[in-house]
Image (cartoon, helix red, strand yellow):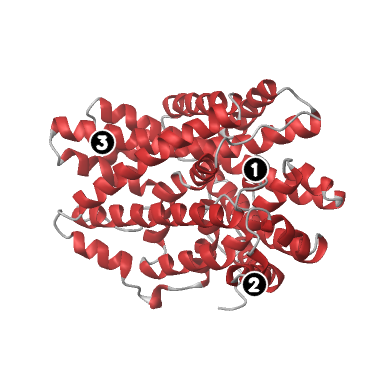
Amino acid sequence: MAIRSGFSSKFGFVAAAAGSAVGLGNIWKFPFEVGENGGAAFVLLYLGFCFLLCFPVMVTEIAIGRKTQLNPVGAYKALGYKNWSILGLLGIVSGVLILSFYNVVAGWAFGYFIEMVSGNFGIGAQFGVFIQDVFKVGAYGFVFMAATAFIVSKGVSGGIERAAKILMPTLIIIIIALVLYSFTLPNAMKGVEFYLFPDFSKLSFPVVYSALGQAFFSLSLGMGALITYGSYVGKDDNIISSAVLITIADVGIAFIAGLMMFPLVFSQGLETDGGPGLIFVTLPGVFETLGPTLGIVIGSLFFLLLSFAALTSTVSLLEVPVAYMVDEHEVRRNHAVWLVAGFIFLIGIPSLLSNGYSEFFTSFITYFGTEEATNFMTLVEHLANDSFLPLGGCLIAFFAAYVWKKHNLVDEVSKGNPNFSNSLIGKYIDFAISYLCPFILGALFILTVLDRFFGINPIA
């Protein structure tokens, strides 16, 4: 068996894994989820889910990957549980579906970079028209998928790690600069109040499962990404400290993105429930206030960096099925990359068409108990993101605790962290994967499916 390539350093792994977690999920999706779900109360739920439920699952995924040095399907087989490889397959399918619509949004971000370079600040008011120009947006998405495939084709250290080390620090600097600017605008503090001071009357079960889905989505859990990245981690690396840094980076950037967005939203008198278009509607007008030259420079740089942030996530999403093809079917890496990328781009075309261009895909399905139609892109998100990811997290925790057995997980995590089993965090992870994660994630998965797709809310 050939020696498996890997990350050249712990920083490289943390940067790549944080890059997988940090992306459009934090800067695009998190602010609009907060806006649609009542503000600060949603933020508190999201933070709780990240640290209490997602962190133990993250540690488990990385440990399984490092132990087996394989993709999510091969990992369960290598541990001796072939029947459980279907869980790895569920993760791969989830990631493929997510990437199919994620690439469409990444195309929007790249398209906005082009518009900002040309000084088209009015694009914010034309967002609905822009996303219906499927040939232009589709071309942007094609370029984006090609860039993703190019990086993944260069391998782990030479492609994924090198890109993440450059893109992530630059992105953080730009966001912090925009936060500081947003605080100088009129009505900015009203946005801060909406974002930081919770109104618990806004809480409802849909808010709860939206927060959970956002937590899993933003941390790249349940889709095999961290099992795959874990397979490239050195045996002496400290998994706990890496997972802590990844979680803090992900949550921190999401939090800062919200701190940037809502002062900008309130300064322009916009509604907070702007949905997926919130960042695309809001920011061009803000950049225009900076003046023509500075506005073009900052606006172009922001959407370029947003595109780069998306790229670190699309890279990890593509790496998962590529690793599966290479490990399980012995396809040459370069061939696997371009075959999988082409397939995912094609299955993303219905999502591209579902934002007003095609009536069929725009009004694709009406869930039981609702009157309003749901478009194809949102259906894929509800299935893969809101349903499959929590289910995957539930089953991964159950597998680690009761099938693979906790002592094997402890043994793997203890490599590079000999005090793990007796530490407070070790005891918490033991409790979480044994009881907290399987029970809460399993219950929320069932309740989410009942409420989202069948209009049944047993706890209403």
| Disc 1 from disc 3: Cα separation | 39 Å
Query: Pointer 2: what residue?
Result: 427
Front one among 9 and 271: 9
> Which of the labelled discs sits on residue 341, or is there none?
none
Q: In which quarter of the image is the C terminus?
A: bottom right
Q: What element carries label 3?
A: helix
Q: Which residue is drawn at 13% across and 57% down?
A: 186
N-terminal of the two: label 1 or label 3?
1
Q: What amino acid does circle 1 point to? A: Gly
Q: Residue at x 52, y 65 (%)?
A: 51
* Mark 3 or 2, closer to the camera: 2
| Disc 3 from disc 2: Cα separation | 47 Å
Query: Pointer 1: what residue?
Result: 234
Q: Residues within 10 Å of mark 3 (few under 14, many from 20)?
A: many
Q: What amino acid does circle 2 point to? A: Lys
Front one among 9 and 356: 9
Q: What amino acid does circle 3 point to? A: Gly
